[in-house]
Image (spheres, rainbow, N blue to C red):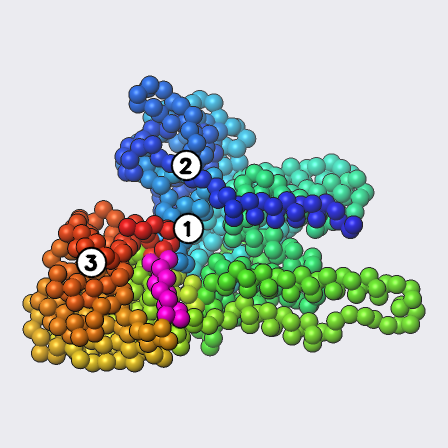
Amino acid sequence: MKRPLCFICMAFVVTVFIYLQLNPPPFAQLTVQEGAEAVFLGEVYHKEYKNGKQILYLNHIREYDHITEKYIMSDIEGILCYMDENASYEEPMLGSTAVVKGKAEPFREVRNYGGFDAKRYYKTLGLDFQLYNTEILTVSDTYSKYRESLYRVRRYFENIFDMVMSERDASIMKAMVLGNKAELDDQSKMLFQKSGISHIFAISGLHITFIGMGINRLLRKMRLSITPAAVISVIAMLAYGEMTGMSSSAFRAVFMFALKMLAKTLHRTYDMLNALALAAVLLIAEQPLYIYHTGFLLSFGAILGICCVSKVIKGMGVFLIHFPIMLCTYYEFPIYSFLLNLIVMPSMTLLMSLGMVCLGAGSIPVSCLSLGLAKLSGFGCHVIIEIFELLSTLSLKMPFASWITGRPDNWKICCFYAVILFLHIANEYSEKINKNNKYASLRMRIGLPAFVKLTLVMASIVLLSGRNADGLKIAFLDVGQGDCIWIETPSGEHYLIDAGSSSEKQLEKYTVTPYLKYMGTDRLDAVFLTHLDSDHTSALVDMLENGCDIKINRLVIAGAAMKDEAYYEIKDLCSQSNTPLFAVNAGDRLDIGKGVTLEIMHPASDYQALSRNAYSLVMRLAYRTKGGEFSALFTGDVEADGEAYAAEGISKYGSCQLYKASHHGSRYSNTQALLQAAMPDIAVISCGEGNSYGHPHDEVIEALDDIGCRVFVTKDTGAVMVRVKDGRVGVKTVLGKTY
C-alpha cells in the first residue's frame, strides 16, 4: 500500500470524528452561581492586550473551596481573565502561578442557527470559563524565562510597528507577522473575511517557509553544514511559532517544516501528505475538537488540495476542498475571491519582506538611517495594505459579489467530497496505467476527459449550493428581550416579522443576518413590523442604516401607527435606502406564497392608539395543505383592547395550531378571550433570560396549560423552528429543551 502512514492517520481522524458524533465531549460546570465572584489558581500561559485592556489565559486550574479553605482539583481546563482596568497590579510572567478573583461566567452556547458557538470555540482552545473584573491576589516568583522572553520580543516588535505605522496598518501587520489578532479592528477583519482573503491573518506555511527557508539558506551561504543549519532553522521556527501563539495552522506549518529539514538532513525523501497526516493526528490527539475548528480545516484542507486535488483540475485544488468548509462556516461564498487571491497571494511575499525589513531596521539602535528605512518599509506595507483593501472593496461592490447559499446538508457535503475523491482515485489510477510500458509504447493516454471532470465538479457545486424550499417553515429567533420571526413559504418566499431586542447588542450583526444566511435567505420579500418599539425594530434599523447583504423588498407597518419619532425614523431610513414602505389595516389579506395567506386582524385604519403596543399588528397566517389548513397567529405586543378586536375576527376561523404569545408572555396581554378564540396547540414566548419584567408571567403559562397548549420559551429553548410539511407539524429547538 502506498503511504500506509497516511491511511493509518486518516483512519484515526475518521474514528475520532465518529466518536465525537456519538459521544459529544462534556463541558465543565461552574460550582458558583453565574456572575458570582470565584477564586482560582492557575498557570499563566498566554497574555494579550485588547482595546488597551489586558487579558490573561490560565490553565492547570485549581478551584478555591470556601468550606475547606483550600485549592482543590477541578475539571476546568482553562480560564480567560479580563483584568479589572481600575485595579493596580504587576503584570504576571508567563509560566507563573497566579491566584485570581473575578466574576465567573460561562461562554455563550449557540442559541440560533448560524450563530457563533463561543462555548465550543473556546473549549477547542482549552478555555472553559471567563472571569470579568479580574483581580490578581498573588503571583509566584517562578516563571518560564523562555516563554516570557519570547513574549517580550513580540511586544518589542509590536512597538516598532506602532512607532512607524498608523494604528490600523500596525494592527494588520501585527496579525500577519506576529500572530496578534486581538488589536485588529472589526472593519478590516470583516472586509477581508467577506472578500475571501482573511487567511492572510493566519500564521501558516507562507510565514514558516519564507522565514525558515530564508534562515536556512542564509546559514548555508555562511558555509554551515546541512545538519547544524537545519537544527538552527527548526529551533528558530519553533520559537517563532511559540511567540505567535502556535495556532493549529502554525503548528502544522512548523511541524511539516521540521520534518522537511529532518528528511534533508538524513538524505531521505520528504512526503508532504504523510507529514500533513501526522501533524493532524498530533493536534487531534491533544484536542479532538479541532476536527470542528475552521482554522484547522482550512489550513489542512489547503495543503490537501495542493497535494491531491490540483492534479485533477489545474488551479482548483484548494477551492474544491475549501468550498464546503466556507459554506458551513460563513453560509456564503465571495465569487471574486479566486481572482482576488491571484493578486493577493504573490503580494504577500513582498508584504512579509517589507514587514521584516521594518522590524529589522527598527531594532537597530536609533539613527536617522535605520529609522528612515523602517518608515520607508512601513510605507511600502501601507501601500500594499491599501491595495488589498481597495481590491476587496471593489470586489464586494461588483455584481453578484456574494453568493449566499445557506448551510449545506451533511449528505450533500458527503456527496461533494465523494465526487472529488472519485476524481482523485481515477486520476491516480490513470497515471499508473499510463506509466505502463505497454501503453507508453503505443503513445496512448487513458483517463477521464477534462470536460467529464469539469461536468462532475460543476454538478457537485450545484448540488452543494442548491437550496429548495421544503414545506412551510416558521422560526422564532432567540433575541433576548425582543421579537424576530422568520418565515419561508413552500414556494421560496422569505419574510420577517419584527427584528429587534432591548437586551442584545448588535443583534443584526451577530444574530439576524447570520441566521438569514444560514437559511440561504439572500432577500426578504417583506419585513412586517408589528409596532415600532426598539425591541422589535433595532436590528431592522441597523439593516437599513448600515446596509446589509440581505435585500429588503418592502417594509410593512400598521396604518394606525402613531406618527411619533420612531415612525419618522423608520420612514426616513426607508427613503434613504430606497425601501418601499407600505401600511396595512384590519381586513387586508395578503398572498405571501403558494397556498399561504396573511390576514390582518388588528388594527383597523381608524383605530386610535394610546401607545405603540396598542396598535401592534395581529396577523393570521393560513397555509392550505392536502391534509387540511395550518394556521398561526402573530400578535406583537398587542394589549387587551386590541386582543378583543382580534378575537372577534379569529373566532370565525376556529382554533389555530401556532400562537406567538403577545408581549413576551405578559399577564397584561394574552387575555382569556383571545386564548379561547385561538385555542392553539403550540405557543411560543419570546423573552430574555433574567429580564426585569418577569416575563413570561406564571398566569400566562397556566392559562396556556389549561387549554392543553404546548409552550416553548426562547430563553429556555433557544430558537424554535416550526415546520409544516404534508399536513404534519414538527417543532425543533436549538438547545433541545422544552418548557
**Residue behind mark 1:** 117
Nearer the camera: disc 1 or disc 2: 2
Is disc 2 placed on a helix, strand or loop?
Answer: loop
In magenta stretch: residue 12:
no
The span shown in magenta is: 720-732
- Quote the CA–CA distance across marks 3 and 2: 40 Å
Residue at 35%, 35% in the rendered image: 30
Q: Nearer the viewer, mark 3 or mark 1?
A: 3
Q: Amino acid type of disc 3?
A: Ile
| Residue 586: assigned label | none
Q: Is residue 707 visible?
A: yes
User: Which callout, 1 or 2, points at the residue further toward the start of the chain?
Assistant: 2
Task: Give the labeled residue for mark 2.
Answer: 28
Residue highlighted by disc 3: 707
Q: Residues within 10 Å of mark 1 (few under 14, many from 20)?
A: some
Q: Is residue 241 left or right of residue 186?
A: right
Q: Earlier in the sequence, mark 3 or mark 2?
A: 2
Q: Is residue 582 above or below residue 710?
A: below
Q: Are marks 1 and 2 in contact (CB under 8 Å)?
A: no
Alpha carbon separation for disc pair 3 and 1: 36 Å
- The foreground one among 708 and 372 is 708
Residue 300 image position (x, y, % from top left) = 61, 52
N-terminal of the pair, mark 3 or mark 1, is: 1
Q: Which amino acid lies under the numbered mark 2 shown in the image of this protein?
A: Ala
Three-letter amino acid code of the residue under disc 1: Asp
| Coordinates of residue 116 in the picture (x, y in percent) | 41, 53
